[in-house]
């Protein structure tokens, strides 16, 4: 394959040659991927892949309107570029007016690392992991799991001079251990697969399976519950994905306020919790600029190349921002806010051991699963507990408990939370296909609503 | 000329653009390199997926993007271990290199493989071709014309009283696959699918609340004819009725929670079938291959031919041949010809979904053809065929079923869904809920979810509607596996009557 940087140049040259668009955006992403999967102490499906995505967005301007044609292709054949550009320009010529039109950003040259080689990955990333797993496979517990490494390098260029480049490493390891009917889970996010703590994960799993030597059946009901970071991440990421400003302004989301407007400013909790995204958060680094081939209520293709900064979605317990691309921010007279591809919640000061010790009777969860919206007006979500619900009695974990179906809103969880721990890096179990970069606290919920019992183990 | 397989006839050919690729040369290069590397088995797949997703908000274009994903994949068995590699390039050098990479993966990991891979036999199909049945290739219709139709449909809804916002979406896809394996099969296939949806929203700004209702048109293995005109779906009638139905819903009373008799329309029941039968009868789940992710299944092999899944009225088939089914195909991703078989017969669990490895593992002579990968860059895994509840012999209408209920609900359209990791406990909502009183519909209610354990639910099924009530629903986005893969699948079913299902009031569930 020719270098991605050359594809960028060829697209812009082709766009100028065809000349049927006023502006052009090109986004080329080279992706290398490797995966390991195992079940019952044996490898199952494993592989490596290499791919490229080239997105061409043509913009035709007519007086005060703009019209977009967007095509994306994985073709790496140079002969395909001209056709891709021509089709994009043709689509723009016939497209209706774009509702999120804005001037393209301008730039003046490529960053210093523009021409550097593109990093990759392969099965070699798992060498140390495989050695540790091999030892685990020889033990009595049955191990299931997945290790995944993706390295994506994105090149963004516009006909107005913007040139930006970013390499996004994304990695995760999940291990599920089973002993009899007991099941436990451990997962970590690991962008470059450096020092994956497999032995510590296996030790943690073994300890959790030991907790399940005693099991207790509990009915549905409301329980004092400690939600560990992975479960908080899964609920808050879903909330974060739903915090678009337009929907709230138009009265069709749970963040719309009675009487009109939005719930920005509403105090959810007296706990000093701040939920934010920040592309420069240590260990959770992600793209510091917009690169979008398609528009949505949270992102506009006209904003391609725009800096993404830290946004406090909740600050000191109050809703403080909703997502607005530039055009929507102008329409509603508010600030631009674009989410980075990570989520953090800070402000808690407790620690999990102390929270367990301070619990007279309650539940400690491990992970959540199959989370879906039940009622969008209150953002009521349903889902299941999974791979370990533990009973806390008099400050100690005393047994494993059956799984439950819950019905809860992340907004209401924040409204009712009574304690939060110091945040820690975690892997959101439900959303790890899309979101691996999270730092979250453990939350104490005095009355978590377990709607029914699940027989699943 | 047309191609025939499994009852499906198409008057179409595979597109020339795909056939012009050096498919045979790629296969020869990959299979030769795999053999040279020591592979006992190898297959090559050239996989192209073209999609176009159009989204409008209040009649204005929000997003339109045309995607074309193509690449080659090589899968090998070396020392009884799978190896896989893919690449975006379509040259013979890259195909050979991918084969060597796949061999390398298998060799590296064979020490960690505790179970030798063996494939069930399948006849060899040389130079086979299959094309799905559709009238209008959606990629021959201009994007501007597609957007124009969605604008017009949106406008009809926006013009109605009580409709404040409208979202419109259509997702079209064309999938082309060339497959060749070291047994000698070589198969070229092409299929098309379409998913349209419009949703109307009514806002009560003073109260800070809102209500929505979506069209019931299902995703289907058809072309643009499913969106334009009323031949396939009654768009004129549905778009005319929707605002009035939404207005009625906004004014309807909140449901009374508790055990309730339900008559469920196919537009809702298909999704319950998908989650509680489709996924539960996947053999890979049942033996733990998905334990860390999608989950396992209560329907374990020891229960095959023994467990009562549901009432005697419950007959469920799996098939990859139903007309316009989203999982309908000529041959699966391992070169196994499409079939139809029973999963549940007279309420008894009798069948699984299999690929060639799992058929062998279950002791069967042949796979039933459920292997699928959603792109060149993903490993084929066992995926769901079209799984359908069969109608009763007596042609009971939906009204006949409703007439048997003194007090209950009639549920129409799917919305929210969730089920646990062993497919026991599920909860669903819907688009519309009608109160049944004395065997007749008596207006809508709102805030409804139904919750049950799979076998309790299907054993509570007293009756199924007849063939005249049977409809095909489905989804574009069924997720499974790591790395995550999506698959499109259809589910047919009649209306059906269930007794004493637990109905929740979602406002009460939220603690308000």
Image (cartoon, coloured by chain):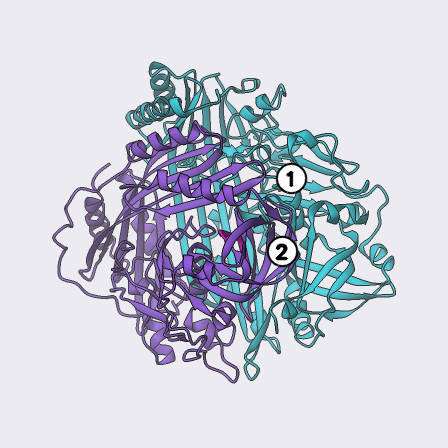
Chain colours: A purple, B cyan
Q: Position of residue A450 (x, y in %)?
A: 60, 60
The numbered disc on residue B56 is none
Q: Is residue A169 visible?
A: yes
Q: Position of residue B265 (x, y in %)?
A: 73, 55
Q: Quadrant of residue B4?
A: top right
Against A109, residue A178 (above or below) is above
Q: Is residue A367 magenta?
A: yes
Mark pair 1, 2: CA separation:
32 Å
Mark before the other along the chain sequence, 1 or 2: 2
State which quarter of the image contains the N terminus of chain A: top left
**Seen in the image, is A111 located left or right of residue B447?**
left
Label 2 lies in what chain?
B
Residue B160 versus residue A20: which sits nearer the camera?
B160
Magenta stretch, main secondary structure, is: strand
The numbered disc on residue B298 is 1
Q: Position of residue A7 (x, y in %)?
A: 23, 45
Magenta highlight range: A365-373
Instruction: Tally the marks.
Output: 2
Against B319, residue A374 (above or below) is below
Label 1 lies in what chain?
B
Q: Position of residue B22 (x, y in %)?
A: 36, 27
């Amino acid at each position: 394959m020719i270098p991605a940087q050359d594809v960028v140049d060829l697209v812009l040259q082709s766009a100028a040659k065809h000349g049927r668009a006023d502006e052009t955006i090109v986004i080329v992403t080279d992706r290398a991927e490797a995966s390991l999967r195992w079940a019952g102490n044996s490898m199952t499906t494993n592989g490596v892949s290499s791919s490229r995505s080239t997105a061409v967005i043509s913009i035709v301007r007519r007086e005060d309107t703009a019209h977009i044609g967007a095509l994306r292709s994985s073709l790496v054949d140079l002969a395909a570029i001209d056709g891709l550009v021509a089709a994009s320009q043709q689509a723009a010529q016939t497209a209706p007016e774009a509702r999120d039109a804005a001037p393209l950003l301008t730039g003046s040259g490529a960053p210093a690392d523009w021409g550097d080689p593109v990093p990759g990955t392969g099965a070699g990333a798992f060498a140390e992991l495989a050695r540790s797993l091999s030892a685990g496979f020889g033990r009595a517990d049955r191990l299931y799991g997945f290790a995944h490494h993706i390295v994506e390098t994105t090149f963004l260029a516009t006909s107005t001079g913007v040139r930006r480049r970013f390499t996004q490493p994304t990695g995760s390891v999940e291990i599920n251990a089973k002993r009899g009917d007991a099941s436990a889970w451990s997962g970590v996010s690991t962008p470059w697969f450096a020092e994956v703590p497999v032995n510590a994960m296996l030790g943690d799993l073994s300890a959790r399976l030991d907790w399940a030597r005693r099991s207790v059946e509990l009915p549905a009901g409301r329980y004092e519950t400690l939600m560990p970071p992975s479960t908080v991440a899964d609920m808050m990421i879903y909330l974060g994905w739903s915090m678009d400003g337009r929907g709230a302004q138009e009265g069709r989301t749970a963040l719309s306020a009675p009487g009109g407007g939005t719930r920005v400013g509403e105090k959810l909790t007296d706990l000093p919790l701040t939920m934010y995204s920040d592309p420069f958060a240590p260990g959770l680094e992600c793209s510091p600029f917009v690169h979008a081939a398609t528009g949505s209520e949270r992102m506009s293709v006209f904003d391609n190349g725009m800096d993404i900064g830290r946004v406090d979605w909740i600050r000191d317990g109050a809703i403080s921002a909703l997502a607005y691309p530039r055009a929507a921010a102008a329409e509603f007279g508010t600030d631009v806010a674009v989410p980075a591809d990570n989520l953090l919640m800070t402000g808690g000061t407790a620690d999990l051991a102390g929270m367990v010790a301070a619990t007279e009777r309650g539940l400690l969860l491990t992970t959540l699963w199959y989370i879906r919206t039940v009622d969008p007006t209150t953002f009521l979500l349903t889902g299941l507990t999974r791979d370990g619900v533990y009973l806390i009695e008099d400050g100690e974990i005393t047994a494993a408990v059956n799984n439950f179906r819950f019905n809860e809103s992340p907004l209401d969880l924040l409204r009712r939370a009574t304690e939060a721990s110091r945040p820690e890096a975690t892997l959101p179990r439900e959303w790890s296909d899309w979101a691996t970069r999270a730092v979250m606290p453990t939350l104490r919920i005095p009355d978590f609503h377990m709607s029914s019992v699940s027989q699943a183990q | 000329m047309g191609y025939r397989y499994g009852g499906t006839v198409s008057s179409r050919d595979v597109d020339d653009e795909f056939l012009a690729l050096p498919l045979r040369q790629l296969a020869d290069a990959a299979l030769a390199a795999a053999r040279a590397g020591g592979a006992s088995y190898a297959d090559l797949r050239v996989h192209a997926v073209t999609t176009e997703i159009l989204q409008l908000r209040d009649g204005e274009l929000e997003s339109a993007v045309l995607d074309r994903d193509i690449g080659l994949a090589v899968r090998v068995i070396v020392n009884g271990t799978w190896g896989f590699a893919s690449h975006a390039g379509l040259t013979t050098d890259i195909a050979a290199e991918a084969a060597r990479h796949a061999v390398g993966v298998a060799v590296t990991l064979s020490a960690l493989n505790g179970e030798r891979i063996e494939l069930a036999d399948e006849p060899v199909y040389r130079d086979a071709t299959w094309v799905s049945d559709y009238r209008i290739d959606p990629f021959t219709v201009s994007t501007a014309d597609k957007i124009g139709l969605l604008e017009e449909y949106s406008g009809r809804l926006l013009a109605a009283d009580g409709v404040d916002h409208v979202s419109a979406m259509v997702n079209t896809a064309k999938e082309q696959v060339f497959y060749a394996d070291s047994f000698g099969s070589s198969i070229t296939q092409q299929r098309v699918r379409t998913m349209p949806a419009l949703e109307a929203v009514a806002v009560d700004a003073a109260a800070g609340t809102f209500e929505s209702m979506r069209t019931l048109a299902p995703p289907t293995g058809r072309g643009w004819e499913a969106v334009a005109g009323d031949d396939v779906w009654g768009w004129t009638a549905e778009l005319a009725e929707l605002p009035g139905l939404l207005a009625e819903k906004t004014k309807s009373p909140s449901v009374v929670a508790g055990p309730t008799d339900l008559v469920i329309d196919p537009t809702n029941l298909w999704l319950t079938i998908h989650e509680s039968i489709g996924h539960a009868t996947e053999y890979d789940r049942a033996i733990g291959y998905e334990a860390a992710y999608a989950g396992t299944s209560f329907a374990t092999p020891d229960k095959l031919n023994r467990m009562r899944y549901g009432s005697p009225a419950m007959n469920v088939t799996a098939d990859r041949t139903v007309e316009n089914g989203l999982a309908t195909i000529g041959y699966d991703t391992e070169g196994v010809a499409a079939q139809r078989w029973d999963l549940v017969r007279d309420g008894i669990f009798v069948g699984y979904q299999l690929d060639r490895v799992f058929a062998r593992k279950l002791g069967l002579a042949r796979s039933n053809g459920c292997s699928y990968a959603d792109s060149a860059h993903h490993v084929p895994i066992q995926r769901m065929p079209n799984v359908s509840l069969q109608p009763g012999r007596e042609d009971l209408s939906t009204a006949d079923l409703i007439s048997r209920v003194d007090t209950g609900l009639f549920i129409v359209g799917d919305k929210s869904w969730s089920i646990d990791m062993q497919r026991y406990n599920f909860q669903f909502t819907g688009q519309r809920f009608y109160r049944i009183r004395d065997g007749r519909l008596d207006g809508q209610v709102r805030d409804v979810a139904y919750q049950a354990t799979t076998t309790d639910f299907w054993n509570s099924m007293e009756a199924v509607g007849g063939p005249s009530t049977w409809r095909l629903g489905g989804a574009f986005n069924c997720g499974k596996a790591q790395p995550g893969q999506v698959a499109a699948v259809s589910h047919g079913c009649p209306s059906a009557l269930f007794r004493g299902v637990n109905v929740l009031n979602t406002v009460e569930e939220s603690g308000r």
